[in-house]
Amino acid sequence: MQDPCQAREVLGIVGDKWALLIVRMLKDGPLRFTELKRAIDGISQRMLTVTLRDLERDGILTRTVRNVMPPHVSYELTAMGRSLREATAPLLEWSITHVPHIDAARTAYDNR
Amino acid sequence: MQDPCQAREVLGIVGDKWALLIVRMLKDGPLRFTELKRAIDGISQRMLTVTLRDLERDGILTRTVRNVMPPHVSYELTAMGRSLREATAPLLEWSITHVPHIDAARTAYDNR
DNA sequence: CGGTATCCTCAGTGATACTG
DNA sequence: CAGTATCACTGAGGATACCG
């Protein structure tokens, strides 16, 4: 293993339960907190906040606060975030075509 | 969200702490249990076993036992496993070029 | 060599309530 | 609206010991 360091650090992002889902939702432009919450089914307010902070810290997205009442906060991918999104696209492609096979493999495996 | 189902199921594989590391190690051909254990720094015997079973169940790799003494068990990617490996290649590329930027972003973020 | 079996810990996550 | 604070829980994963 020579570049496992990088491989692992990326897994820290990619392996996250919610991170890639958020990155995907932002691919067509900025969204507000509540829009993300509605779009990502099942995420708790807490985890959305935590994951957004992590992604902001990693330079994957930016957080923009407009100081109005009621508050208006929007999240947008950075250039790096967009490149990450592109790098994961093949994986999403793969998943769409292969998930059925995986399910089949599992069923076959379990029936033994 | 229309195909988030696939996205999530893939995260079940890809999001795993060890799975992608194993898939990567097997890209150049089959390896034995102990070889994998040595190659993947920090993995416990238990987690190697568990993860290998999961990947076998998902049809990502095959487990071949040669009944000799001492035992000889080797693991090899299936066609699906190889295609998964290829689908994750861009992500590895991305990680190699961007991890330094992520580290920089983190340091910058923390110094505020 | 290539596992299983146990036990144990703690980080990740959800639920709930409160707030500028 | 967009959080923060607190608590409680679960299960992923490590350590250790044993086995065919």
Image (tube, coloured by chain):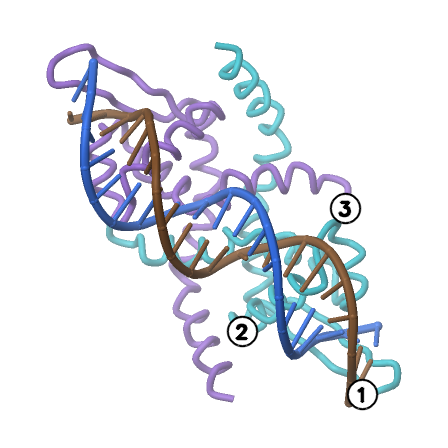
Chain colours: A cyan, B purple, C brown, D blue
Badge 1 crowding class, 10 Å Cα cut-off, few under 14, some 14 to 19, many 20 or more, is few
Q: Which residue is mark 2?
A: A57
- Give how far apart the Cα atoms at labels 3 and 2 are: 26 Å
Q: Is residue C1 left or right of residue A55?
A: left
Q: Position of residue A95 (x, y in %)?
A: 59, 35
- The image position of residue A29, as x and y in percent, is 74, 64
Q: Return the residue at label 3.
A: B1
Q: In screen coordinates, is B43 left or right of A22? A: left
Chain under numbered label 2: A
Point 19% across, 10% down: residue: B67
Q: Secondary structure at mark 2?
A: helix
| Horizontal and vertical percent position of residue B72 | 18, 19
Helix, strand or loop at mark 1: loop
Res A23 quadrant in image:
bottom right
Three-letter amino acid code of the residue under disc 3? Met
Residue drawn at 21 percent across, 12 percent down: B66
| Kind of residue at disc 2 | Arg
Q: What is the distance, in whole Å, between disc 2 and disc 1 at their CAs?
A: 21 Å
Dot 3 crowding, Cα within 10 Å, few <14, some 14–19, many 20+: few
* Residue A54 in which image quadrant: bottom right
Q: Position of residue B85 (x, y in %)?
A: 43, 36
* Quadrant of residue A5 within the rendered picture: bottom left
Residues under labels 3 and 1: Cα distance? Answer: 30 Å
Residue A67: mark in rendering: 1
Q: Residue at x 46, y 23 (%)?
A: B57
Element class at badge 3: loop
